[in-house]
Image (cartoon, coloured by chain):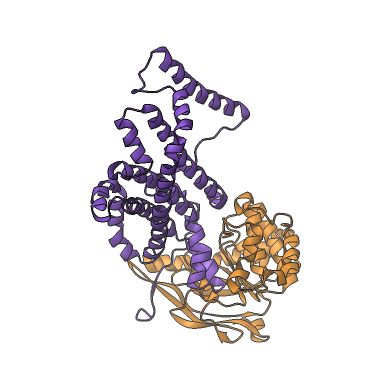
Amino acid sequence: MSADTANGKAKIKIDSASKVYETQSGYVHALDNFSSDIQERELVCVVGPSGCGKTTLLWALSGLHPLTSGTVYLDDVPVKGPHPEIGMIFQEANLLPWRNLIKNIEFPFEIKKLNPNDYRDRIQHLLETVGLAGFENKYPRELSGGMQQRASLVRCLSFDPSVMLMDEPFGALDAFTRDEMNLLLLKLWTENQKTIVFVTHSITEALFLADRILVMSPRPGRLTREFKVDLPRPRHLDMQMTPYFMEATKEIKDIIYASIEVEQHADG
Amino acid sequence: MADQLIEKIPDFDKKESTVNVAEEGFIDWTSLTKPPTAKNMREALIILAVAVAIVGGSEVLVRLFNVPNYILPAPSKIFTALVESFDVIGPHILITLQELAIGYSIGAVIGIVLAAVITQIPFIEKIITPYIIILVTTPMLALVPLLVLKLGFGLEPRIVAVALAVGPMVMINSATGFRRTDMAKIALARSYGATTLQLFIKIRFPLALPMIIVGLMVGGIFGLLTAVGAEMVGGGGGLGSRLVFYSSLARMEPFFATIVIIATIGISMYVIFFLIGKKWASWEA
């Protein structure tokens, strides 16, 4: 546990989370005894090679898939299922193709049986912030990948959850759109004061966004290092060229490669 | 750890929703659901000119070679017969439409409901599907003599035959639709706390809708075929019985006029479902 998580209120508390999947070739330890606290309004990135259990961790936090053992607490209450304070952002924008943009944004309200008209100003403001005002009647297929993911950000923020869980949301986008989306996310995070857990396999993305990076090792998915990002806010793309950023990238890379080598030795 | 709650690795496949529906269907119906259309005025004019040439050309050829009426009446004579015999044929149109409407509604509702239910239970689906395929591939016309024996010469045997032809066709296509489970979209709805019913109404049904519409379209065509066929076999009223009546008297003008009417009904159904598909399933294109 790093020093800054000891004080302040933990929004999310992950207590010895473990998850075992059954496959045809036996049991896979996707997540092993993972513990960490996430502070209110903190932006935490989870980084690791594919198959390290990042997504498993996120789905456990969301309450969609139960843990094999261990507990996730949100505001000191165990998460046992989908939670109204949690909004998820998926790998691809995951818009419903048979609904136009505004109907997609109203989708959570329909499921939650809320009246979207009560949130009209908020939705409109968010659409303007992400630059989608005027596209309300467009269908997802008429929008670019970046626009679709921006729409999914609006959908998530529209009902004002206090926690956002993001599963490699910008992985499918090109590098330029990705930078743009990262800046937009930081802007939305600053304006909306959310607690964000952001899963990515891009160290650059993690360093650019995060207050703190949880570095994971593959099979079993373990927390190998908590890395506090020492970059001022607001962040600028230029920061990615600073010596600190380069060194930090190398350090995290080394941690990950070391864990992969350990795994390979163990396999061999 | 292994003795505790253990699950299969979930498959969060994001690509499933982009699969072309027609490819997963019982048969590829794209030739029906997505016909090539004229892309500009010039093409439209040429297509129209060819149609006129075919009708006009057959008129000229029939007259030029003195083709006897019992082989092929000239289009103008067929048109005249259509106008003159319409009073006689009219009530038969209503009979056929009535059989079609009732049989189709029964078959379509049962088909959709059955598809929605059995696709939720994969094992039951495996048991039932072979019988549905038998029902789809066996012409229900073969059952008409039996149905007439049981139900008499009224509308009932034909309605049952139509329902039997429509139901399995709608069902097999709808089942293909309901089987498309997009885990990411279901997870999205569940993350908002969706109930099973909400998942069905908001995700599974819209996802299945394009295939349901294809099933309804093809089912309609099969239903018309079965209705007319049953009338030909089973006697009594209806356009099919008119075909038998006119051909037995070698009155080929009203015979072909009846065929024109049947074709018009078929094309109308096709156009209706094409437009419905355009409105409710165009997101798939």
Depth check, front residue: B38 or A258: B38
B107 and B155: which is toward the camera:
B155
Question: In this orientation, which residue lies closer to the viewer: A124 or B209?
Answer: B209
Residue at 34% over, 64% down: B122
Indicate whether B1 appears above or below B284.
Answer: below
Residue A17: percent from the left, percent from the top? Answer: 49, 80
Chain identifier matching the purple colour in the rendered picture:
B
Question: Which quarter of the rendering shows the C terminus of chain A?
Answer: bottom left
Residue at 26 percent of width and 49 percent of height: B143
Count of residue discs: 0
Q: On the picture, is A51 further left or further right than A244?
A: left
Identified at 44% across, 20% down, the residue is B58
Q: Can residue A49 be seen in this view?
A: no
Question: Residue A6: x, y in percent?
Answer: 64, 86
**Looking at the image, residue A45 lies above or below residue B41:** below
Q: How far across and down, in percent of the image, does residue B261 sit? A: 44, 37
For the N terminus of chain A, which image quadrant? bottom right
Residues A63 and B62: in front is: B62
Q: Is residue A246 visible?
A: yes
Tint of chain A? orange
Query: Which residue sits furthest top?
Result: B64
Location of residue A163 in the rendering, given as x and y in whole percent from the top left corner: 63, 75
